[in-house]
Structures are given as C-alpha cells and as structure tokens.
Image: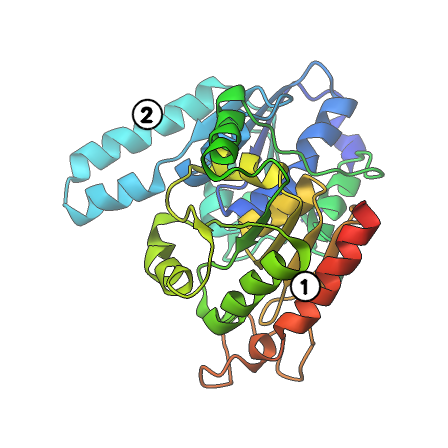
Amino acid sequence: MRVSIARWGATIDRILIIRSSAIGDVIFASPLIGALRRKYPQAHIAWLAEPPVEDLLRRHPQLDEVLVWDKAGWKRLWRARRYRTLWRAFRAFVGQLRRSRFDTAIDAQGLLKSGIWAWLSGARRRIGLGSREGSARLMTEVVDKPRDSDLIGSEYRQLANHLGLQTEPFPMHVGLWPEDEACVEALRQQHRLDDGYAVICPFTTRPQKHWFADHWIELIGRLRHDFGLPVVMLGGPADKPAAAGIAAYAEVIDLTGRTRIPEAAAVIRHCRLLVGVDTGLTHLGTAFERPTVCLFGSTSPYLRTDSPLTRVIWHGLACSPCRRKPTCGGAFTCMREINPAEVVQQCKALLESAS
C-alpha cells in the first residue's frame, strides 16, 4: 500500500525507527537520524534495537531515546518454559511503546518481527522498507528497495527520499563517549602505538564471508614490513578460537572478545588503516572516514561510498553474490582469489592519498 505524504500532513512530533540489528545495517541506517532531525528539529526521535547495538545508538547525539528489545533474553525464557515471565516482559515492552505515543513508525528492517513492533507501537503512520514475510499488511506505506544499487546504504537513502528528507549529504554517524576513547589511550600506552596502527576485522557470522587465515597471516606481516604499522585484530567473543589460529602465526595485537562495541569503534576511529570483511566493524572504518579496504565475496558489495578513503575488493564471479546459499561446496573461491598482494596495493594507494 502506498499513501502520499501529503495525506498525513507535515507535522511529525514523535518518531520511532525500527532496525533492531545488525551492527552494519544500523550504521548504514544511522543517517536517517540526522536527516529526520534536520527536517523535524523539535521531534522526539527514538530507535528500537536489541542489546548488541544498543550501546552504539545511545551515543548518538541526535537520538532522544533507545528502546531495548531483549530478544535473546526472551528466547531464553521461552526455552526454559517460563511463559508467564515472558508474557509479563512482552506486556511491559508493549506498554512502554504505547506510552511513548509515536505518531510515525519507520520499519527500516522490513521483516515480520520489525513490522509487528511498528504495528504494536500504535503509530498511525507506519512506513516499511521492502516489507516482506507478511509485514506489508501491517504498514500504511511500503517503500521498495532499490535494485542492484552499488551505493552504500542505498535502501535507506530511498526511504529518506520517500519521507522527503535531505539525502545529500547523507553521512553515517557513530557517537563515542570519553570512556570509549580511554580504551585507545590505554592501548597506545601498553603497546607503544604513538606512530599509529592498522586494524583488521577478519570475522563475521557466515563462513562464506570470511577471508582465509593464511591470507590474514601474510597480510599482517606485509602491513608491519611495508608500512611499519603494528596490527590490532578486533572481533567478538565467539571469534576467539579463529583469532587464536591467526595470532599463533602472526605478530598481532589480539583484542578479539576483549572490547565492547563502542571501545572497538574508538580503536577504529583512531587507526591509520583498516582491512576487513563484510562486517559491522569494517563499516565503522567508512563511517569514521578512515582509510578502509573492504573484502567482499558472497554478498553484494557497495562500490560507491561517501568516503573517498574506502576501497572495495570484489571479483564478481559468476556465482556471486550467492548470499546465504553458496554453491561452491565450501571452497569460497570468491574470497580465496583475493590475494594479500592485491590488498596491500589498495592499502598503499589509500595511505598515499590520506597523507
């Protein structure tokens, strides 16, 4: 269903953005906050999110409120058959949504779960981005995603255009607090990094998006030898075993599982260079306009960004992007064929342009 903006009028007082996960998509969607604030400076702008991205959103200076949906906690209650406790948690959260009296809900995730929250918010106007899984029936408007766009965050720009918001510029924004920056100072002192450092982000949720450990080991050596840069490795707690496999054969400062997301963001903000796969931490390099090399294979890459300091390596094989359904039997050729020499070449070009 599509409804013209004029029907609803120009007055918007209380806005709810729904994009509960993942880190990368929340970063890509973050320009919506600034664009909404420019058009509606007095509006109350809230974001519904899950705990993994909550900390990043709380640091955004133009966001008034973060509503936290503890989905993982609810799942634990369901598995433990604590249905009464789960029902109370559900009612309390819906009550919190209703008390906020949102007049506009923007479902930037487009799934059934996000569409349900938009509907339960009680907002009269509900805009869904590429709504699927039946969520379109819960919306008053649906905005189609652009097809085959190679522009970073193109779907969120299209959503902003539908809302009549300014999209040039359309900068991603991640806020940090002083205590996050303190992590960087401690890192510098402990490892004597006054002359700068590189960051690698090797890990994500799907194996077909990973680069290979032997490539990372070779790259770490080249970054140290060719550019004189110590290398910091970032990742989450679940990535520790894979990180240990790299650290055993390379001279790397392994912070995997040792930083919260805002602390990792601060480490990235102050790096001289970042190399990573298609994961949220890598996209922070682009958001902070740090020299960033992104390695894509099974996922659709963005080839154009608002930052001249981001380079994307994607070979675009006949079978890619395969997204969640690889056809290569685990060979992941699209990532294997990206070699360390190619990455080093892009790093060199970026560092020269940034100097």
Could you say which is closer to the camera, residue 147 or residue 307?
Answer: 307
Q: CA distance from mark 1 to mark 2?
A: 40 Å
Sequence-wise first label, 1 or 2: 2
Which element type, helix, strand or loop, lies under badge 2? Answer: helix
| Among the 4 quarters of the image, the one containing residue 46 | top right
Q: Which residue is mark 2?
A: 92
Which secondary structure lies at badge 1? loop
Q: Amino acid at mark 1?
A: Pro
Q: Residue at 52% of width from left, 34% of height from top? A: 188
The amino acid marked with disc number 2 is Ala
Residue at the farthest left position: 81
Residue picked out by circle 1: 301
Q: Residue at x 45, y 81 (%)?
A: 330
> Who's the residue at 64% across and 52% down the image?
228
Q: Are marks 1 and 2 in contact (CB under 8 Å)?
A: no
Residue 309, how many percent across, how many down? 77, 49
Residue 343 point in image, percent of width and height: 67, 66
User: In this rendering, would 154 be left or right of 340?
Assistant: right
Display coloring: rainbow
Within-10-Å neighbours for mark 2: few <14, some 14–19, many 20+: few
